[in-house]
């Protein structure tokens, strides 16, 4: 018998907790055939609705259901990390509570694990049911990431992954505070099989990601897995130095030949403001990395547990 740990980060998902359990349990015949036990680790990410009570009810009914409850909302990344840290399984799978990661894919995923893959990842091939602007920016983000980062980050990839113990131990060895799990999965490597599925809309409740939150998250991803913005800042600085130097020579030569007619202050003002803007922009980029470094150096815990079941 081997053990499968299922990690389900939940933030205000009271309606989805029992629905997820029911849907997941449908795999029972497969688990029996495969010789698998399972444990479900619901990670309550500081929910303010009845999520905890729902998990407690399930725990009463089925002791294979566990809960890790945070002292406040720490974000999904922290939830996944806590799940990985507390999972006892030989295989570990991370799934959303809203059933957007269909548990019915598990038998197929296991078939690839049995064929020798270390991890089976999923990506959705459509984004139906999602606002078009959101899809558009998501696509742009993945294209950009592909260009600027050496770590493989796949468009449409979900956090839904079945992994062996070895892969999860590798993920756990990455202690960084700014966690961009999609990037971390790619960074640790291992043989990964990608399987595709049509997007499923969440059954109950609402998405926790506003457009603004997603934008900030994407910037976080870029900074966590690429230092290209820093190089761009340096490049822009050098370009402006060269332009300034050429302009200087041009002005000196012009003055020597044609004298020095007063004038040209509006253009001067434009140049000064432009350069000041570029400077502030570059300092801003450096500041962002510095801020991230500052947070890492503090070495704060990624999550704080209030209660465990
Ligand atoms: N989630 C979480 N903490 C948060 C936000 C979300 O644990 O701060 C969980 C949420 O309960 C769900 C999963 O992360 O199980 C994915 O969230 P959501 O469905 O809102 O994201 P989407 O599928 O819209 O990208
Ligand atoms: Mg969802």
Image (spheres, rainbow, N blue to C red):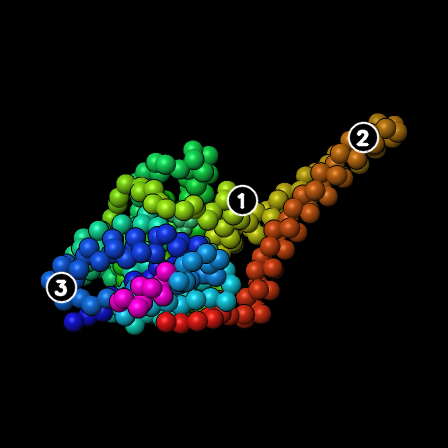
Q: Earlier in the sequence, mark 2 or mark 3?
A: 3
Q: Nearer the viewer, mark 2 or mark 3?
A: 3
* 52 and 126: which is toward the camera: 52
What crowding class fits label 2: few (fewer than 14 Cα within 10 Å), some (14-19), or many (20 or more)?
Answer: few
Identify the residue position indicated by label 1 in the image: 212
Identify the residue position indicated by label 2 in the image: 266
Name above or below for residue 274 compared with residue 151: above
Residue 194 percent across, percent down from the top left: 26, 50
The residue stretch that appears in magenta:
54-62
Q: Earlier in the sequence, mark 3 or mark 1?
A: 3
Task: Judge from the rendering whether residue 196 lies leftward or rightward of residue 257; answer left or right.
Answer: left
Q: CA distance from mark 3 to mark 1?
A: 44 Å
Identify the residue position indicated by label 3 in the image: 32
Residue 143 percent across, percent down from the top left: 42, 41
Assign a secondary structure to mark 2. Answer: helix
Assign a secondary structure to mark 1. Answer: helix
Name above or below for residue 209 compared with residue 270: below
Q: Earlier in the sequence, mark 1 or mark 2?
A: 1
Q: CA distance from mark 1 to mark 2?
A: 38 Å
């Amino acid at each position: 018998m081997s053990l499968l740990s299922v990690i389900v980060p939940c933030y205000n998902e009271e309606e989805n907790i029992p629905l997820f359990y029911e849907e997941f349990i449908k795999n029972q015949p497969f688990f029996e055939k495969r010789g698998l036990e399972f444990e479900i680790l619901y990670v309550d990410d500081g929910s303010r609705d009845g999520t905890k009570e729902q998990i407690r009810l399930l725990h009463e009914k089925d002791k294979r259901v566990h809960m890790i409850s945070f002292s406040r909302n720490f974000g999904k990344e922290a939830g996944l990390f806590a799940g990985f840290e507390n999972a006892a399984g030989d295989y570990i799978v991370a799934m959303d509570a809203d059933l957007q990661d269909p548990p019915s894919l598990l038998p197929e995923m296991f078939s690839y694990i049995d064929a020798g893959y270390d991890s089976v990842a999923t990506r959705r091939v459509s984004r139906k049911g999602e606002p078009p602007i959101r899809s558009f920016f998501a696509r742009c983000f993945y294209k950009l990431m592909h260009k600027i980062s050496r770590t493989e980050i796949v468009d449409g990839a979900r956090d839904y992954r079945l992994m062996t113990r070895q892969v999860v131990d590798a993920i756990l060895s990455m202690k960084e505070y700014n966690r961009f799990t999609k990037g971390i999965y790619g960074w640790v490597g291992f043989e990964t099989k990608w399987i595709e599925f049509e997007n499923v809309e969440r059954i109950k409740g609402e998405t926790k990601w506003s457009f603004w939150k997603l934008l900030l998250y994407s910037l976080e991803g870029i900074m966590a897995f690429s230092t290209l913005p820093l190089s761009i800042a340096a490049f822009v600085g050098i370009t402006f130095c060269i332009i300034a130097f050429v302009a200087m020579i041009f002005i000196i030569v012009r003055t020597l030949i044609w004298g020095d007619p007063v004038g040209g202050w509006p253009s001067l003002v434009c140049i000064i403001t432009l350069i000041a803007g570029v400077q502030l922009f570059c300092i801003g980029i450096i500041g962002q990395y510095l801020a991230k470094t500052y947070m890492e150096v503090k070495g704060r815990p990624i999550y704080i547990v209030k209660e465990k079941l």
